[in-house]
Amino acid sequence: MGESILSSPPRPVAVGSPNLRTGPRFYAGVAFFILFLTSPLFIPLVVLLPIPVGAQAALSAGLAIGLPEVFGLISIWLLGRETFDYLLRPVKRFIDRVSPKFVSRRRHAVGLAMLLLPIADAALFMHWDDWRDLFAGHMLVHAIVWNVMIFSGFLMLGGSFRTKLRALFVHSRREISDVPMADECQ
């Protein structure tokens, strides 16, 4: 009988550049690819919009969580998976170069602090008026600093942390405990 698409072996991905066909679809795909990568960077600008705080929070959450994935899917649809992976390869290389697979305990603690302090600040900001008044004239700087800290915290925590975090959202038969800890690899 004929083989199902799901059971057929995956096609090998070319190491070189894919066949890039320029045209309106390609340029639209590249535009959505750029939005996929940069949409979280627009979060600090949301503070400047003359909309209620609740709408700012919803828009910020969309720019951080939902919209990059939507832009990525549209980009994959327009460009094709091979071209999307080709364009994403330098970004992945940069992250792997800056953030090692395993980190020391001190670097892990600093990375956790950099990741969790902005989250704690956001909780205080939403529920305590005096905390909001403290940053009244400097909302944009405040938002930029905390966003840089969150991104830097992910880089500081290393590849093992990102693998475990990704495993929380991907269904597979492999358990998170199968990922080796830093102590086991030394």
Image (tube, rainbow, N blue to C red):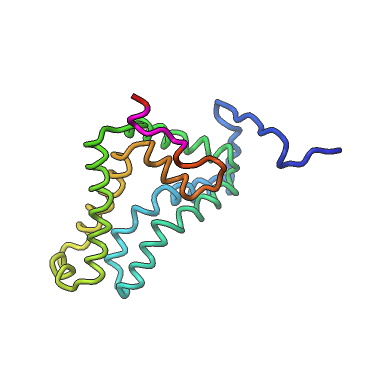
| Residue occupying the point 44% across, 36% down | 179
- In the image, 138: left or right of 39? left
* Total numbered labels: 0
- In the image, 96: left or right of 122? right
116 in relation to 3, above or below: below
Q: Residue 117 location, x and y as percent?
A: 23, 54
| Magenta region, residue range | 178-184
The quadrant in which the N terminus is found is top right
Q: Is residue 51 magenta?
A: no
| Residue occupying the point 30% across, 60% down | 45
- Residue 65 location, quadrant: bottom left
| Residue occupying the point 43% across, 40% down | 163
Q: Residue 177 location, x and y as percent?
A: 44, 39
Q: Residue 132 location, x and y as percent?
A: 18, 69
128 in relation to 35, above or below: below
Q: Is residue 181 magenta?
A: yes
Outermost residue to the bottom: 52
Outermost residue to the top: 186
- Residue 26 location, quadrant: top right
Q: In the image shown, does 17 or 175 lie closer to the viewer?
A: 175
49 in relation to 144, above or below: below
- Residue 166 location, quadrant: top left
Q: Residue 141 location, x and y as percent?
A: 20, 57
The quadrant in which the C terminus is found is top left
